[in-house]
């Protein structure tokens, strides 16, 4: 099952290394926001949306388009 792990480098509740470790062990894609904290969606919702969209686009088979 494809998985995208997102983390914030400024997370004071959960060490971002935990997310890095999960991504490595699950062989999952990973993106880390350089300044956001634990609540990525509130800290930088547009960044989260861009990461998810880019990840989905990279996973889309060549020549096949998704509905908007």
Image (cartoon, helix red, strand yellow):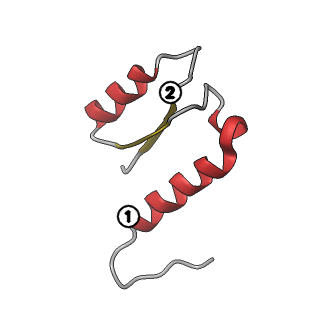
Give how far across and how far down residue 2 sits, in percent: 37, 51
Residue 29's disc is none
Position of residue 46 relative to residue 22, above or below, is below
Q: Quadrant of residue 55?
A: bottom left
User: Residue at horizontal 36%, vertical 49%?
Assistant: 1
Q: Residues within 10 Å of mark 1 (few under 14, many from 20)?
A: few
Which residue is tagged 2?
Answer: 9
Determine whether the residue tagged by mark 2 lies in a helix, strand or loop.
loop
Assign a secondary structure to mark 1.
Answer: helix
Residues at badges 1 and 2 in contact (C-beta under 8 Å)? no
Which mark is first along the chain, 2 or 1?
2
Identify residue for label 1: 59
Residue beneath the point at 56% across and 21% down: 11
| Rendered residue at 52%/16% (across/down) | 14
Label 2 neighbourhood size at 10 Å, few (<14), some (14-19), many (20+)? some
**Which part of the image, by quadrant, shows the C terminus?**
bottom right
Task: Report, in whole angstroms, how far the alpha carbon at label 1 lies from the one at label 2.
Answer: 25 Å
In the picture, measured across the screen, residue 18 lies left or right of residue 14, that is: left
User: Residue 25's quadrant in the figure?
Assistant: top left
Nearer the observer: mark 1 or 2; the answer is: 2
Residue at the far right: name it. 42
Image x and y of residue 21, in percent: 32, 25
Q: Where is residue 17 in the image (x, y as percent from the top left)?
A: 39, 21
Say which quarter of the image contains residue 41: top right
Q: In this view, does 54 lie above or below 10?
A: below
């Amino acid at each position: 099952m494809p998985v995208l792990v997102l983390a914030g480098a400024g997370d004071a509740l959960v060490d971002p290394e935990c997310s890095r470790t999960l991504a490595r062990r699950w062989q999952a894609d990973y993106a880390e926001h350089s300044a956001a904290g634990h609540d990525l969606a509130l800290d930088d919702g547009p960044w989260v949306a861009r990461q998810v969209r880019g990840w989905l686009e990279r996973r889309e088979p060549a020549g096949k388009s998704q509905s908007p």
